[in-house]
Structures are given as structure tokens and as C-alpha cells.
Amino acid sequence: MSTLDITANRMETFSDWMNPILVKETRQALKSRQFAGTFLLLLVACWLICVFGVAASGGNLEFGQPSRNFLQSFYFVLAAAVVIIIPYTAYRSLLTEQDAQTFELLSITSLTARQIVWGKLLNSIVQISVLYCAIAPFVAFTSLLQGFDLMRTLIVLTSLFGVASLLSMFTLMLSTVSRGRQIQTLASLFIFGGLISMFSTSIGMGMALINGEFSLDIEFYLVWAACWVIGLSYFALFMQITVSQLTFDSANKSTGVRLVATAQFLLFWAILPIGSWLFGTTISEETIYAMIFVSLAHWAIFGFFISMERNYLSRRVRRDIPKNILVRLLAVPFMPGGTRGYLLLLLNLGLLTGLFSAFRPAYTGYGADPYFVYMGVTAYILFYYGLGCFISRVMLRSSSAMQPMHARTVLIVIVAMGVIVPYFILWGTGIYDFDGYNNVYHPLLLSNPFATLGELSDLRSSEAGLVRALWIGACIAIVLNLRAMAGAVQEILAPKRPKSHAETSDTAAVAAAS
């Protein structure tokens, strides 16, 4: 057998091993007008940059340092293709499957939801790689010019590749969340606007790095590595959310997502101290405060969804509950259900409070104490999400037609009323005037997180009294869910397992024999 025959057989075996969704999507994408147009436009734009750039440079091409200008132009064209067009195409690809009702055909095959998502994502990565191959000769041309920095070029291009892949995964996740036609149309506008915003950010960071505005020292590489690790963790989170959205309803959709979100939070707090210890650098006070409030935002967004889920455990989920009592105890907050989600939120915010107490710098007495602001934000999260957990439990129990999204909508309305209504009361009673110049904080604004947190960051405020009042409300919300949380824990520790098929057959055989 000739070498060509052996190679052909190996390639055929490799194509059979590959993800079938990847093969299908790549064939369709490479034949589509959208990708062909993007590819040709990128080549034409880069060719024009070379022609007019060389003509405009003149003598500077040989004696100056024109490589930065050429590389910035090529980077701009490449970023427009891989940050805007490819992620938006990934978003539309899964929506097209749902609109054409072909996704049901995929779901009844032997392919798992994870394989379908990976196939869609790898198709986007293949398209990004093809565009990188198209621009590679132009980057090679730039390397022949004066002032070319290989390390900066590698950092810029690899970072752009990672951002484009992460955005493709993010848009795939959003395509599984938006189901209705009206929601899809509105979401498409927001997604396109968000991609343009990310394109602008990528251009700003890339141009600054190419121009040498960032020094490539140890701290830069530490931050760059931390961004990669955090980006990979969000990639895993988006992947898990997408897979759970495409999984059938009786499966366990929550545990994987909650585990990834918790691991992401712990990783976020481990990477900077470890990197600081390895490289012998110190973590600044501003970095600690940034980590605290980024973690708060992480759990505020995540807690909005996990604290208002349906508490029902399907037969499949109850059958797969671990048999070891210790493992079951550890698994309680990660199991499906809004009450257990609120318990997970409580545990992680408690851990975050301990980390803040351990790492926060000593308060100097100048400016507002960030600890009071943190405690205020935490109290608001616990109060409103505890109220949402209670409302969702009542609503979902009252009717099978109710969905968790209805409870989340009600909570949004309650928060909006808590922000707006106190102002109307104060204006109606004459305490506040419409010009707002002489208005001071009033206790009636306690339901308004924006006004209260602004007051907590003001030196004139009685911070301890406000925080105490907020935590009274948070404790009331916790008490409202205390009995339900105890029942949710008991449901996992002493589960009512459905009998397996073998146990049912044995029981029937014994009954027939007797």
C-alpha cells in the first residue's frame, strides 16, 4: 500500500472520529457567503494596507520603524472579523437550528448536549483559525520591517484568539437562553452592541500593547496569566450553562453549573495570592478591594438565578443522589432547587466575608470605610434574594403554569418599587424637592440600594446604624427561608429514592411467587 493510500485511510479514520456537528457546521460555514465574504474582505483590506502603507512610508520604510503602524492596521482588520462577525455567527447558528426545528433531530440522536455545543464552538474556532492563517503572510511581512517586537505580537494575537473564542462561547450560551421570537430580536441588538463594545476594548488594549505602553515585566506576565486562567474559568462556566440549557428537563441541570461557579470563585481568590508568592510581589490595597467587589458582583448575578429555581427533584435526580452520608451533606447546596441555591449563596457570601476580614488593610480613618459598603451590599443581596426565594417558592407551589422567570420578574418589580416609591412619598410629603439640592438621606430610602450605598460611602453618614438596619432586614429574609432550607437539607440527607428497574422486577417476582 502506497504512502498516499495510508495517509488517505488515516484521514478518513480521523474524520470519522471527529465531532459530526463540527464536520457539518464547518462544511456549511466554508460554503456560506458570509464566511467567504469575510475572508475576501480581510484579504483585500490587508492587501490595500500593504500597498498604500508601503507607498506612504517612502524612505521611512527602510530607516524608520513602520512595523507598528502596519501591525496595528492588520490587528484592526482581524479583530473586526473575529470579535464581531464570528461570535455573532455562532449566536445565529444555534438559533437557526431552533427556528428551523432541526435541533429536535439532533437531540434524538446519540449525540449528547455537550457534543452538540462543542461542535458548534469548534466550528467557530476553525473559522477563527482560517482567518488567522489568512493574515499570517501579512504579519510575516511586518516582521521584516524595522521595530518589530515578536513577543508583543505573540501576546496580542494569542490574547485576541482567546477573547474571540470566549465571546463565541458566550454568544452560544445566550442563544440557548433567549427562546421567544421577540426576546431573540431584542437580544440580537444587545449582543451586536456588546460585541462592538468588546471590539473597541480589544482595539484599545491591543494598540496600547503594540505601541509599548505596557512594560513586559513580571507583574505584566502575572496579570496576563491571571486573565487567561479567569477567562478559561468563565469559558467552563458558559459551557456548563449552555449544556444544562440543552439538557432535558428531568436531568440535573444545576449541580454542574453551581460547582463550576463555586470553583471559579475559589480559583479567583487563589490565583493572585499564589502568583504574588511565586513572583515575590505584594497585592495592593486597590487589588484586594477590586477582588472583593468583583466577587460580590459574581454572586449577585449568579444568585439571582440559583435562588429562584423550582425545588422539585425528579426521579432521575433522586436516584443519582450519592449514597455516602458525608458526600450527601457536602452536595446539599449544589443540588437543584431555589432554597438550596439560596443556601449556597449564604455559604459563599459568608466565606467572602471571612476573606475580606482576613485580607483587608487597616482602616486609616480617611475616606469611607469600604468594609461598611461591603456589608451593605451583602445585606441587600441576602434580603432581596431571600425575598425572591420565598416568593418563588410560593408562586411555583401555587400553580404548575408558573415558571422561575415569573418569580424573577416579580423580584425585579419589587426592587424597582423599592427604589422609586420612597422618592414619591418624600416628594409628596414635602420632605424632598424636585431640584434635589437640599435633599439629605432619609430612613425611608432604606429600600433603595443605590441611595443607601451612596450614603454609606459618604463621610457624613452614620454608617454603623445603616448597616445594622440593613442586616436586620437580611436576617428577616433568612428566617423566612430557614424552615424551607432545613427541609431542603433533609430531602438530600434522607432521600426518597425511586426503585430501580431490577428492584421493581424482584419485588414483582416475590409477590407472584407468594
Image (cartoon, rainbow, N blue to C red):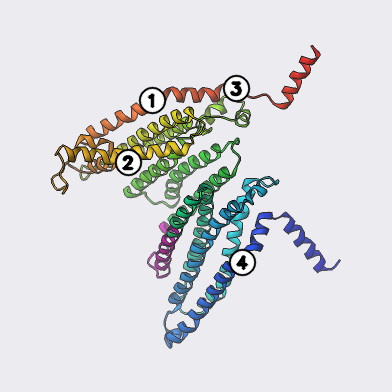
Q: Which mark is residue 496?
A: 3
- Which residue appears at 52% of the width and 59% of the height? 87
Q: Is residue 118 left or right of residue 484?
A: right
What's the distance in space between the residues labelled 2 and 4, CA to CA? 45 Å
Vertical relation: 197 (above or below) 355: below
Amino acid residing under circle 1: Leu
Q: Quadrant of the N terminus?
A: bottom right
Q: Quadrant of the C terminus?
A: top right
Amino acid residing under circle 2: Ala
Can residue 461 be seen by looking at this rendering?
A: no
- Where is residue 318? Give x, y as percent: 60, 28
What's the distance in space between the residues labelled 3 and 2, CA to CA? 41 Å
Badge nearest the viewer, 3 or 2: 2
Badge nearest the viewer, 3 or 4: 4
> Which residue, given by chain and number where applicable, does mark 4 sit on?
32
What's the distance in space between the residues labelled 3 and 1, CA to CA? 25 Å
Q: Residue furthest right?
A: 1
Vertical relation: 218 (above or below) 305: below
Q: Quadrant of residue 100?
A: bottom right
N-terminal of the pair, mark 2 or mark 1, is 2
Amino acid residing under circle 4: Ser
> Which residue, given by chain and number where applicable, does mark 2 sit on?
416
